[in-house]
Image: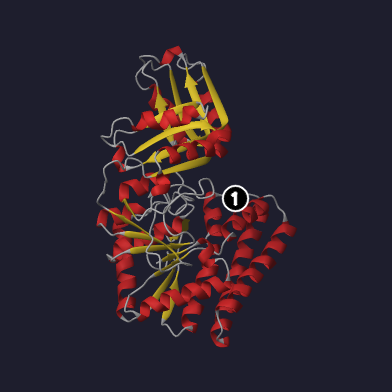
Amino acid sequence: MKFGGTSVASGENIRHIANLIANYVGQGYAIVAVISALKGVTDRLVEASEQAKNGNRDYIREFIQEIVEKHLTATRKAVENKVIRKAVEQEIRATVDELEKVLTGIIYLGELTPKSKDYVLSFGERLSTPIVWGALRDLGLNAQHYTGKDVGIVTDSNFGEASPLMNVTKHQVKEKIEPLLGKGIVPVVTGYIAATQDGVTTTLGRGGSDYTATIVGAALDVDEVWVWTDVDGLMTSDPKIVPSAKMMPELSFQEATEMTIFGAKAMHPRALEPVMEENIPVRIRNAFNPENPGTLIVKEQKIKPGDAVKAITLVKDVALVNVSGAGMVGAPGTAAKVFDVLGKENINILMISQSVSEANISFIIQRSLLERAVSTLEIALLGRGLIREVTAENDVCVVAVVGAGMKGTPGVASRIFTAIARKGINIRMIAQGSSELNISFVVKEIDGEETVRAVHEEFKLNKI
């Protein structure tokens, strides 16, 4: 069971999820709990690490006081037994002391490496997990808490977005956790945090607690992985954009992967990989509405007749880059050169489109990387006769339409684009893979929400 977001936002909520876990343990379930940082803490740690790099001692002093108080307040609400509460409080103070030393070190050095940033960001989960452990002990459960590093999750050294080395990880996690479950202990594990083979702290990328849960689930060959969140399940669209959006009772791994890659909030994009290989179902559930069975994600794709589109997601904070030039036509390896330049800068490409004339390549990247991408491409490729210009647009968004039923259903794209055209919205770029599970296209950011509503309405997804 993975708990994140609002379910660990406060001491009262932590007490609530501890009761949830205790309830399932009482029914005979063997449970591993994976815990995210308290709501908002990871963002504050990102900010604190930047402020430390800039030498802002006053900010760090205030931040440390605030972070201690936040976690001690949560502990007081979550843990009633004074002895257990004192043990949790001591651990929080010791962990925050360590955090303060790390941030002070960054102030002195005046630099923030990806390695030291990962170390700073690991403190969110290291502070929240003991509180959950305390709440479980308070309810009479035999619980122990660990970091992802402690239970043996090993990754490469791509700090900030580390990838697990699954063979060694599976072996170590199984060896560490199975005996605990055999003794009736509830292991409480930090999400998001792992380590290299040399024991250096790494993180699995934002939303990485989901990834931790599925890695642990795959290693232990569990029955199901439950991701507890504050929504009933995966929705046909974001309810803030489409108030009539409905929950989807079941999805295939491939459909869910398409949705998570395109920003459906409930999952880390790579989180489904470990459980897909082992064919372990994942269930997304609402911690505040546990009677609802949530969305079940399974291997089989179930397609009902006429059920072409299942969901529409909107990805913001992206930018469009266009590389063009007559020298690209018929010149083998041009695309490879463009993507090689970006790859060396660790710039990930979300979506690609190239016309058959080969005279230009358009692609989508994260907006925060736009300046670096454009300047890198200009330095590396302009003036070599291959490309004439690099242009960019930073006021766009991506709309992704997902559904296994689109495959082999004629006219789906036509219906999508007609619905958008009726609203007078112009499409800037289109991409569809041969899997036909997803049609993605780019529109101006101001038209994004209207586009989502138009497609949702066209396919009557509010009738699920």
Residue 217 versus residue 265: which sits nearer the camera?
265
Whether residue 245 sits left or right of residue 60 in the image: it is: left
**Where is residue 280, by image quadrant?**
bottom left
Q: Is residue 401 above or below residue 358?
A: below
Q: Residues within 10 Å of mark 1 (few under 14, many from 20)?
A: many
Please name the amino acid that badge 1 sits on.
Leu
Q: Position of residue 447 (x, y in %)?
A: 55, 34
Quarter of the image where the N terminus is located: bottom left
In this rendering, does residue 261 appear at all?
A: yes
Which of the two residues, 47 or 438, is positioned nearer the viewer here? 438
Q: Residue at x 42, y 75 (%)?
A: 21
Q: Residue at x 41, y 27 (%)?
A: 353
Counting from the top left corner in percent of width and height, residue 291 is at: 41, 69
Total numbered labels:
1
Q: Nearer the viewer, residue 21 or 461?
A: 461
Q: Picture coordinates of residue 386 (x, y %)?
A: 45, 16
| Quarter occupied by residue 102 | bottom right
The structure residue drawn at horizontal position 30% and vertical position 70%, both measured from the top left corner, is 175
Give the x, y percent position of residue 160: 49, 50
The type of colouring in the image is secondary structure
Residue hosting label 1: 112
